[in-house]
Amino acid sequence: MMEIVDAASFHRHPRIRRILSRREVEDPQVNRVVSNIIAQVRRRGDASLRQWTRKLDGVVLRSIRIPAKEIERQAARASQEVRRAISAARRNIEQFHRQQLETSWKLSNRSGADIGQRIRPITAAGIYVPGGTAAYPSTVLMNAVPARVAGVKRIVVATPPRNLTSNPAVAAALREMQLEEVYGVGGAQAVAALAYGTATIEPVDKIVGPGNRFVSAAKRLVFGQVDIDMVAGPSEVVVVADGSARADFVAADLLAQAEHDGHASAICISNSRALALQVQAEVEAQMRTLERKQVCRASIDRFGAIVVTPNLAAAEEIVNFLAPEHLELHLRDAEIFSKRIKNAGAIFLGSYSPEATGDYFAGPNHVLPTNGSARFSSALGVYDFLKRTSIIRYSQERLKKDAPSILALARAEGLTAHARSVELRIRKGAGNAKNRSRRSGNARRARLLVARLKRSKP
């Protein structure tokens, strides 16, 4: 049952401490296993991928790459209704992400100096699409669309070998995005292959997409060789509700989060104890009718809570402390309250904006910062697939003007070679200017002499 917690004891309450303990910590044992897998993939390549796939997935890979015809065949198994929904969702997601495009720029407001920034997409992105209970077609869309909008030319997908047959909707999403470089490899070994490459899989520049703790550990360990989106923890929602909220709506949204897995966290914050009691009862009643009620039970009993606050100002303070992945506001003045929130991955305003709208269809990305990392990070977007290169062009005159400042800073840092690289140009420049002036004067005198001789001829 969802425990009701008084705001006065929030920071010291055992239930809240347990919820906060979910925040990602490195597991030395997992790291050792994953480090071994990565080392073997680097050393043995495709042979290691086949070995680990047979050992962990029970599948003997005839081909590491999934043929385009097989993707087509599995996509056709998805219902027309699902295929239409995937297509409509893709359009909404594209429309939203096109607003994030950045453009190169140049600034020439300093005499003799041009500065600017050149925006270019990364060359290759790898998307990890998990299998099992987390095999979601929305994962394909939310990761591939921003990469495609950014202009990434090569988008690679790695997914466990049985994923497309067990969930044809994933294949339908691959087909919708016209992704054909798809490999039937999952787990830490897939991350290693994307990062370092094998005979079959060329390495990528960035790896994105969710996964279990072994996938997350692998992404953490290959970071630096490639970029990654984030190391995501279990999913979470915070629902802030006042006395005007419908308890059945709130309970349904808490359970929608809890059904992800037993480590998901669902928290309700309310300034109404009466509503808190109603939500508590509704959660129990609705849970009994759900297909994934056992998963929901594990999540709610361990990581669910209803926090009762004296007012909404106290709720605001708790929200900013938790920095939740998803924040729902079932409030009379949701817009006003939302403007006071500093830390949240995505905010859903009003009673008719359940988290499911953002998970699937509205357009904003559902790859969001978890475990309090919304304090310093953002949703996945087009900008995650772009590089920014600084451009600097100095004229000789501008370098001479700025040289005293540059030299002072270089010498203050004890970097004499930096200083010399500027001094050399100033000295050479002055010498070249004198030589050019001397050569110009000599040429002028020569022309005058030739003209005088021509006039003196009979």
Image (cartoon, grey):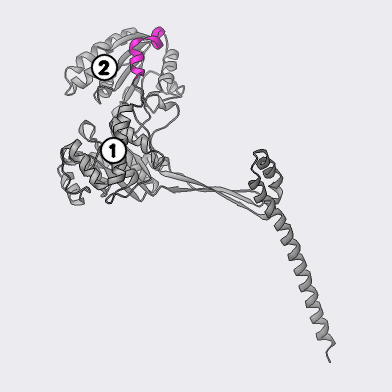
The answer to whether residue 390 shows anywhere in this view is yes
Q: Position of residue 141 (x, y in %)?
A: 29, 40
**Residue 237, picture quadrant:** top left
> First in sequence: mark 1 or mark 2?
1
Cα gap from disc 1 to disc 2, whole angstroms = 34 Å
Q: Which residue is mark 2?
A: 300
Q: Secondary structure at mark 1?
A: helix
Q: Quadrant of the N terminus?
A: top left
Q: Which residue is mark 1?
A: 37
Q: Secondary structure at mark 2?
A: helix
Residue depicted at x 28% and y 8%:
277
Q: Residue flagged by tag 2: what amino acid is it? A: Ile
Q: Is 151 on the left or on the right of 162, as rendered?
A: right
Q: Position of residue 437 (x, y in %)?
A: 76, 65
Q: Which sits in the foreground, 48 or 162?
A: 48
Q: Which residues are magenta?
A: 7-21
Q: Which sits in the foreground, 448 or 331?
A: 448
Q: Residue flagged by tag 1: what amino acid is it? A: Ile
Residue depicted at x 75% and y 69%:
439
Residue depicted at x 35% and y 12%:
307
Q: Position of residue 300 (x, y in %)?
A: 26, 17
**Residue 410, picture quadrant:** top right
Q: Which mark is residue 260?
A: none
- What secondary structure predominates along the stretch shown in magenta? helix
